[in-house]
Image (cartoon, helix red, strand yellow):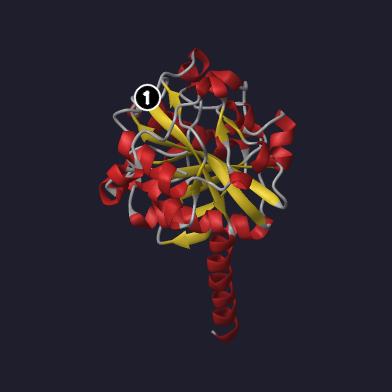
């Protein structure tokens, strides 16, 4: 869940020094249907194929999170100009590549980090568990996917780039039969009272049902319910929300109970939960249409 037209570049990172790793490997790289990539002009979306390409994604994350957003990196991250942690070595990394920018770090212009249960088990937990009790989500029947560490280069925050990222996510969800997606998304600022209307709007209109409801950890819990429902202007509240969160709501997404303040990144985080039915149905129709076209063309 990422956004930098997108006023915030996406799924919350939580403090990076909590789980640093010395270097990534490519053990999480895979995915047959994304192996050949999906093209749109000079842009392509696909999974990272090597540790080197993961390193390029980490370089983009560093530029956006720490240089653009002015988050505070750990000394190890600052020394390498890379954003990294233990999850990078076990996750799949979705990349948007611009082939017009040659072959190297600059060609990666967008990224999402994708973590399924087997990857989370290697680390011992899902990333979001630093902020939320996600027990109900982690134990959900069927495959689950945690989305995070997403960002897009400042020069590529167009509708086309974001649609390409979403096509990649849809292909991944379809391929792995993902039933549920979740992760954290950010609103700018750390004063929940200044965000009272959008937070209250999310609480009153999009709170997840009990069986899908993640809850902010007690020591980090900040109430979303800051205004009575009848005092909220839904149109105004939606306009305040970052585009990424609005995108998930359009997909039928829900919000967990409670926000979390991340002072390191100067954000207020919420937990997003999306059942994948709408995404997979849309992708399945697209995939079937492409198959028919290839057979008749």
**Residue drawn at the location 37% of the way across and 24% of the way down:** 266
Q: Is residue 227 above or below residue 297?
A: above
* Picture coordinates of residue 78, whole percent (x, y): 46, 18
Q: Quadrant of residue 278?
A: bottom right
- Between 90 and 133, the residue placed more toward the observer is 133
25 sits to left or right of 8 = right
| Residue closest to the far bottom | 296
Q: Is there any visible trace of residue 191 in the rendered image?
A: yes
Q: Residue at x 29, y 29 (%)?
A: 194
Circle 1 Cα neighbour tier, 10 Å, few/some/many (<14 / 14–19 / ≥20): some
Query: Which of these two is toward me, 226 or 199?
Result: 226
Taking 222 as reference, is 22 left or right? Answer: right
Tag 1 secondary structure:
loop
Q: Position of residue 150 (x, y in %)?
A: 47, 40
Tally the marks: 1
Q: Is residue 52 left or right of residue 243?
A: right
Tag 1 residue: 266
Q: State whether residue 15 is above or below residue 230.
A: above
Q: Residue 226, how many percent across, how many down?
A: 36, 33
Is residue 44 at all visible to an observer of this figure? no
Seen at 45% across and 51% down, the residue is 248
Q: Quadrant of the C terminus?
A: bottom right
Residue 9 is situated, as x and y percent measured from the top left of the image, at: 40, 38
Tell me what residue is drawn at x 61 percent, y 30 percent. 129
Q: Is residue 73 above or below residue 255?
A: above
């Amino acid at each position: 869940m990422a956004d930098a037209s997108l006023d915030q570049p996406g799924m919350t990172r939580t403090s990076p020094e909590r789980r640093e790793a010395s270097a990534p490997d490519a053990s999480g790289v895979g995915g047959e249907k994304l192996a050949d990539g999906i093209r749109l002009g000079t842009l392509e979306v696909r999974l990272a194929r090597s540790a080197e390409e993961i390193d390029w994604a980490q370089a983009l994350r560093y530029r956006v999170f720490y240089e653009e957003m002015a988050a505070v990196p750990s000394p190890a991250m600052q020394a390498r100009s890379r954003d990294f942690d233990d999850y990078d070595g076990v996750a799949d990394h979705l990349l948007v590549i611009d082939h017009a920018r040659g072959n190297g770090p600059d060609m990666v212009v967008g990224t999402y980090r994708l973590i399924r249960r087997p990857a989370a088990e290697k680390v011992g937990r899902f990333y979001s568990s630093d902020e939320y009790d996600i027990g109900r989500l982690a134990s959900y029947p069927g495959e689950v996917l945690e989305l995070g560490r997403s960002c897009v280069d400042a020069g590529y925050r167009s509708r086309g780039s974001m649609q390409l990222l979403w096509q990649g996510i849809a292909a991944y969800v379809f391929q792995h039969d993902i039933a549920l997606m979740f992760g954290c998304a950010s609103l700018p600022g750390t004063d929940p009272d200044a965000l009272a209307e959008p937070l209250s709007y999310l609480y009153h209109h999009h709170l997840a049902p009990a069986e899908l409801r993640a809850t902010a950890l007690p020591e980090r819990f900040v109430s979303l319910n800051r205004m009575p429902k009848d005092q909220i202007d839904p149109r105004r509240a939606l306009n305040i929300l970052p585009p990424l969160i609005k995108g998930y709501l359009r997909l039928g997404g829900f919000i967990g109970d409670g926000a979390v303040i991340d002072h390191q990144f100067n954000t207020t985080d919420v937990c997003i939960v999306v059942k994948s039915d709408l995404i997979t149905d849309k992708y399945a129709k697209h995939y079937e249409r492409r198959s028919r076209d290839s057979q008749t063309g």
